[in-house]
Amino acid sequence: MEEAWLLVLMGMVGVVMGGYPTVTPSVGQVWPRPQMMKTEDTYMVIRPNTFKFSTVGHDCDILQEALKRYIRIMFKSHWDPETQTNQPWRKDTGFKGYLDGVSVSLLTPCEANPHQNMDEHYEIKIDSPDAPGEGTIISQSIWGMLRGLETFSQLLVPDASAYSINSTQIMDYPRFAFRGLMLDTSRHYLPVSKIQETLDLMAMNKLNVFHWHIVDDQSFPYVSAAFPNLSKLGAFSSRHVYTADDLHTVVEYARLRGIRVLPEFDTPGHTKSWGPGQPGLLTPCYKESVPDGTFGPIDPTNHNTYDFLKTFFTEITSHFSDHYVHLGGDEVSFSCWESNPNITKFMDKHNITGSYNKLEEIYISKLLDIIANLPTKNGYLVWQEVFDNDVEIASDTVVHIWKNENLPIAWKNELDKVTSRGYHTILSSCWYLNYISYGVDWYKYYECDPQDFNGTDGQKQLVLGGEACIWGEYVDRTNLTPRTWPRASVVAEKLWSSSAHTSSTAEASPRLEEHRCRLLSRGYDVEPIWPSFCSADVN
Ligand SMILES: *[C@@H]1O[C@H](CO)[C@@H](O)[C@H](O)[C@H]1NC(C)=O
Ligand SMILES: *[C@@H]1O[C@H](CO)[C@@H](O)[C@H](O)[C@H]1NC(C)=O
Ligand SMILES: *[C@@H]1O[C@H](CO)[C@@H](O)[C@H](O)[C@H]1NC(C)=O
Ligand SMILES: *[C@@H]1O[C@H](CO)[C@@H](O)[C@H](O)[C@H]1NC(C)=O
Ligand SMILES: *[C@@H]1O[C@H](CO)[C@@H](O)[C@H](O)[C@H]1NC(C)=O
């Protein structure tokens, strides 16, 4: 009778024991996959109320904050202190005891800010042959330690009241130094809290560059101290802005997670929103020899332009600690320049015939000169058109490849061309996450490799990495996280893990499924990638 009732009840609440998800998630696997990971079937048990990290090497605020953060992350969703007992959680022959502490061994003093050449190597030993029953995370640098803590947190497998962790040895480092994600805060404003959420997710995927495409044609949310009218007249509203405090908050939040912030101020095109706040900056467009009231790219013939840029970028680089800024330079429309008689006069006077590329070059080379001579002596990235238009660029320029015509031949040829001329480069062409389609779309992101082009080994060394981009025309705070993740996780693994370990979508599938469930259980609305279920679905 009771059994019958139970069956009825189970039927009513829809309990089905075993459905048919597309892929069964792995258990206790790491995303992105480490370079070397060896696990045994033996395991230790971690009890949240007794577990501690202890620092045995160097220490600093970044490390202390990270240890606190990872305790929260590791024990977030599955731990109920009420039900926790000190009984073994699963005492079988594989049980090697309780792991009540992990020693965190940082071998050199912390650097203040993450940078292009930061060292991200780390090692993890849990119940290893040379230290049975113990746990250690070892790194030369604070940046490697942050990556190691993330990996350690992913090794924990939750059960009702505790966590198990297999005997494990990991030796890990990234394949590429530049592993980026770009957000666009011009087409739609993104609240600082959403940017912070993105930075959290980036750290959980070992991405290390936040490329902030902060302004564009549609709005100018950056509040400039020197030119307050830029945002006063160029932002969507007085509330859709980023103040100096906001910038500081973002840069600091990123720093604590080992993430560089690369600000982009794209010129001379994509600058409509700059116009109202800075009269004279943009080129007035003409129609039948009268101004038609619209404006084109920044006017490269006007002296004041360069004074403005110098003051403006001096201010920008004071907010951001990274050596690099992104100067844009994409999609410059020449039709407005062609229509303007002053521009024509300037070109005649300077004996510039035929090509407006040359005019663009004059602008860009003056801008590059300004940036290189700022007190902070910054380096820069540019979108590929600057290179394509034969603009002379400094030898340390990083060329950002984004075009995706005639997929994928064009970007492979471009990688070859850029690197054969000796420039560093990063690839985004195959990783525009703002494009969506029906069906499983992540295979194509996983099958793209930034070193997969015809070139010498020397050329391939010039590829610094790549970047996932999520343009904001159809993305705001409501859909940012699900549209970006876990698809950006796929890019993250391609950029971190070895090419030999990332050649099979079939191998990656169960791990990606586990990782997606992991991010969901940590409280992030990451979207599903196929029919599936996670334990966090029902909470
Ligand atoms: C961890 O150990 C269990 C047995 O305790 C085994 O089933 C599982 O495959 C191991 N996991 C990994 C990632 O090696
Ligand atoms: C800012 O814009 C206002 C309104 O258009 C104008 O009156 C003021 O002179 C401008 N300030 C600067 C510094 O250009
Ligand atoms: C062209 O240049 C002249 C002289 O500098 C200036 O007075 C005029 O406003 C300019 N016109 C346009 C449309 O740029
Ligand atoms: C303009 O360029 C042409 C072709 O390169 C050259 O012959 C001529 O001397 C130049 N004129 C001036 C004024 O620089
Ligand atoms: C690379 O070289 C191979 C062999 O010469 C050729 O078949 C292939 O089309 C080339 N790929 C690209 C992207 O040019």
Image (spheres, helix red, strand yellow):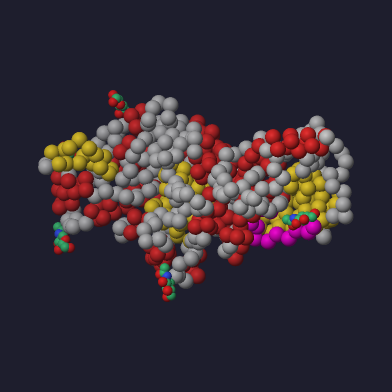
Identify the residue at image location x=78%, y=53%: 166
Task: Work out whether residue 11 or residue 149 is closer to the camera in this orientation and state it.
Answer: 11
Identify the residue at image location x=40%, y=64%: 409
Say if the magenta span includes residue 33: yes
Relative placement, left or right, of 384 versus 295 is right
Say if the magenta span includes residue 140: no
Identify the residue at image location x=83%, y=34%: 2
Identify the residue at image location x=49%, y=57%: 444
**Residue 246 spot, x, y in % from top left:** 50, 32
| Name of the residue lying farthest toward the left | 288
Quarter of the rendering occupied by the N terminus: top right
**Residue 242 spot, x, y in % from top left:** 45, 32
**Residue 226 spot, x, y in % from top left:** 37, 32
First to last magenta residue range: 29-41
Q: Tell me: residue 388, above or below residue 310.
A: below
Quadrant location, ligand no. 1 = bottom right
Q: Tell me: residue 276, above or below residue 158.
A: above
Task: Work out whether residue 369 or residue 383 is closer to the camera in this orientation and state it.
Answer: 383
Relative placement, left or right, of 487 versus 339 is right
The image quadrant of residue 61 is top right
Number of on-image labels: 0
Residue 341 in view in this figure? yes
Residue 226 in view in this figure? no
**Residue 326 spot, x, y in % from top left:** 42, 48
Quarter of the rendering occupied by the C terminus: top right
Relative placement, left or right, of 476 versus 166 is left
